[in-house]
């Protein structure tokens, strides 16, 4: 079985998961922006992973644009965010990013990291603003990801854990 891991990562966590998946499967990994559909279409299994930024999953446009050429392939996706897993947050994320032709693709969550200090200027500004507005909310009214954002603002966090790839590997093995 030939497979490929396509990923889009700004700060390294999604790339780290892609690397672990490469180790476990032997599939090659390629950045979404550099992936060539003709090469991807030669694979039987496609693992896609993207970082979550403001509710969007990076790189998903590659799948949206090319899904017609990937009919009959085994496609498994994951996304990587700072929030702890929360079913409400995850289902809304899935609906927003994996609707229409992508609706049937299994999507998994891998927790990433959060470090304001290492962010690019625009991202840092956005996250600081978001943090300030969430901090004003009553803690009981905050969403799980909002609580994580406020709690994480002061220090560098890395929640990456190899065990998050287990269900992705299992899914790859199902027909
Ligand atoms: C501008 C910005 C927006 C973000 N929005 C979210 C979000 O909506 N939900 C979430 O769980 N994490 C969010 N994060 C955290 C990232 O998803 C997290 O840092 C993840 O590890 C990023 O993946 P990467 O390291 O592969 O870039 C955001 C980070 C940035 C910089």
Image: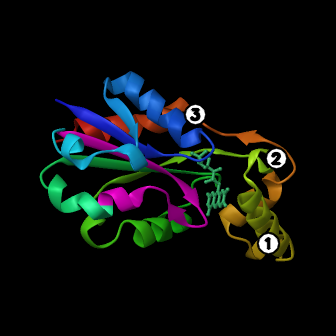
Residue numbers of the magenta segment: 44-63
Q: What numbered label is drawn on residue 161?
A: 3
> In the figure, 134 relative to 72: above or below?
below
- For the point 19% across and 38% down, which residue is it? 43
Q: Callout 1: few (<14), some (14-19), or many (20+) C-alpha neighbours within 10 Å? A: some
Residue underneath mark 2 = 117
Q: Callout 3: few (<14), some (14-19), or many (20+) C-alpha neighbours within 10 Å? A: some
- For the point 49% across and 57% down, which residue is it? 58
Q: Would you say the beta carbon of the disc 3 residue lies within 8 angstroms of ligand 1?
A: no
> In the figure, 26 relative to 169: above or below?
above
- For the point 15% across and 39% down, which residue is it? 42
> In the figure, 38 relative to 83: above or below?
above
Q: Nearer the viewer, residue 113 or 66?
A: 66
Q: Tell me residue 144's x, y (percent).
A: 67, 63
Instruction: Mark 1 and mark 2 in contact? Answer it, CB < 8 Å.
Output: no
Residue 111 location, quadrant: top right
In this rendering, position of residue 46 left or right of residue 149? left
Q: Does the magenta segment cover residue 55?
A: yes
Q: Closer to the camera: disc 1 or disc 2? A: 2
Cα distance in 3D space between marks 1 and 2: 19 Å
**Mark 2 or mark 1, which is nearer the start of the sequence?**
2
Q: Does the magenta segment cover residue 163?
A: no
Residue underneath mark 1 = 134
Cα distance in 3D space between marks 3 and 2: 22 Å
Q: Residue furthest left?
A: 72
**Could you say whether the residue bearing mark 3 is in a helix, strand or loop?**
loop
Which quarter of the frame holds ligand 1? Answer: bottom right
For the N terminus, the image quarter is top left
Q: Tell me residue 66's x, y (percent).
A: 24, 59
């Amino acid at each position: 079985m030939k497979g490929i891991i396509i990923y889009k990562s700004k700060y390294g966590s999604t790339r780290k998961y892609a690397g672990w998946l490469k180790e476990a499967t032997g599939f090659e990994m390629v950045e979404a922006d550099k992936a060539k559909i003709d090469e991807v279409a030669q694979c039987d299994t496609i693992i896609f992973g993207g970082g979550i930024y403001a509710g969007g999953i990076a790189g998903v446009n590659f799948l949206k644009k090319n899904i017609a050429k990937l009919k009959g392939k085994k496609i498994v996706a994951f996304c990587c965010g700072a929030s702890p897993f929360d079913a409400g947050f995850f289902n809304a994320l899935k609906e927003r990013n994996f609707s229409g032709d992508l609706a049937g693709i299994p999507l998994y969550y891998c927790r990433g990291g959060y470090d304001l200090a290492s962010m690019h200027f625009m991202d840092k500004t956005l996250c600081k603003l978001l943090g300030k507005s969430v901090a004003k909310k009553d803690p009981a009214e905050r969403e799980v990801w909002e609580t994580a954002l406020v709690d994480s603002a002061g220090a560098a966090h890395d929640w990456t854990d190899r065990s998050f790839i287990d269900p992705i590997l299992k899914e790859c093995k199902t027909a």
